[in-house]
Amino acid sequence: MSVSSLPFVSVVLPVRHAAGTIGRAVASVRAQTLIDWELVVIDDGSNDGTREILRALARDEPRLKLIEQAHAGVAAAANAGAAAARGDFIARMDADDEAHPDRLAAQAAFLAAAENRDIGVVGSLVHFGGDRVASAGYALHVDWANSLVTPEAIALNRFVESPLVNPSVMFRRELVARHGGYRDGDFPEDYELWLRWLDAGVRMAKVPRVLQTWHDAPSRLTRTDARYGPEQFFRLKAAWIARELARVAGARKIFIWGAGRHTRKRAAHLAAHGVAIVGYLDVDAKKTGRGLGGTGVPVIAVEALPAPGGIFVLSYVTTRGARDYNRAQLLARGYVEGWDFLLCA
């Protein structure tokens, strides 16, 4: 499929106080090999000169549609952009990131391909535009997210962390009308959207190429806004894990892999959604063979794990390499990922 024959794409870019980076982001869209696009920029109450920069850019670029609004938050801004978008496909961008020249063409071609009609959202691999030493955690997250490309890998790992980098995605416009757009609340709005859409059966994949640079600016919302704190992620995931358990676990007993304090604290969010934890698994012999903290809840060794069928395992261990070890151990015992166990964090 040629670039000229691809569907019309709307790029939705919410922005607030980004005078130092918005020009670079807009320039990366203007440099796309795909020509048939519009850029819908929603200025969310900036007062640092961003709005004036955007007005000047809009005068020079007729495909840039500027929406100016009082500050309402990133979810409201993104939804306003999606409502104004005219494209068959909607691509997301952030004000501090850069799209590589063939990003829109590659993702639009992916969604337009006959064999991908069942895919609703397509992301890409991203380049981490930060200091991999000073921001090692974010860099490792990018590496992990880049390892998830297929719909199956994305769906199975969705309870670990967000499997998609939000400003790297493109999705079919009708999904917003069918399943709702971004929601505002005490949670990361992008991750909530992916969990909700995945729960509704939306299939997601990635073009297995680096098509976006994700800059790690100190002012990024994920660093400055309490909605992106660890507890918000744990609490949000628990609600959707509980829904998935209701769908696949049935009456099976729920075991948590990991009996450490931090693991138990994360898993405790499940109780608010009616999930009863009846036991724990652990590789530490000091923790196994007794009740947990005097509660009577058993902690069993991995070697004592029963054959699949009677229990469902949620692996909450986050030590580097532990998830791969846990998965391998469960698969070796005949457990089926997604049906008998899920990896969480």
Image (cartoon, rainbow, N blue to C red):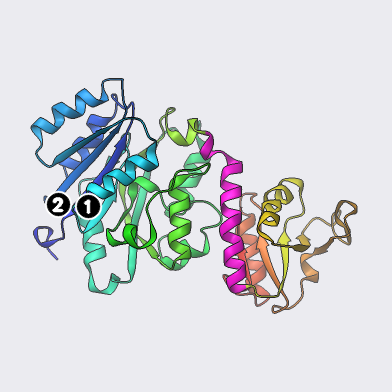
Q: Earlier in the sequence, mark 1 or mark 2?
A: 2
- The mark found on residue 104 in the picture is 1
> Does dot 2 land on a helix, a strand or a loop?
loop
Position of residue 184 relative to residue 150, above or below, is: above
- The mark found on residue 116 in the picture is none
Looking at this view, is 139 or 224 the one in front? 224
Name the residue at 67% across, 51% down. Answer: 269
Q: Amino acid at mark 1?
A: Leu
Name the residue at 22% across, 49% down. Answer: 85
Looking at this view, is 171 or 272 the one in front? 272
Locate residue 270: give its quadrant. Answer: bottom right
User: Whole-percent x and y of residue 288?
Assistant: 85, 59
Give the left or right position of residue 235, taking residue 296 as reference.
Answer: left
Looking at this view, is 256 or 148 the one in front? 256
Locate residue 170: give its quadrant. Answer: bottom left
What span is colored magenta in the figure?
Answer: 226-248
User: Whole-percent x and y of residue 177?
Assistant: 32, 59
Give the left or right position of residue 131, taking residue 245 as reference.
Answer: left
> Does dot 1 land on a helix, a strand or a loop?
helix
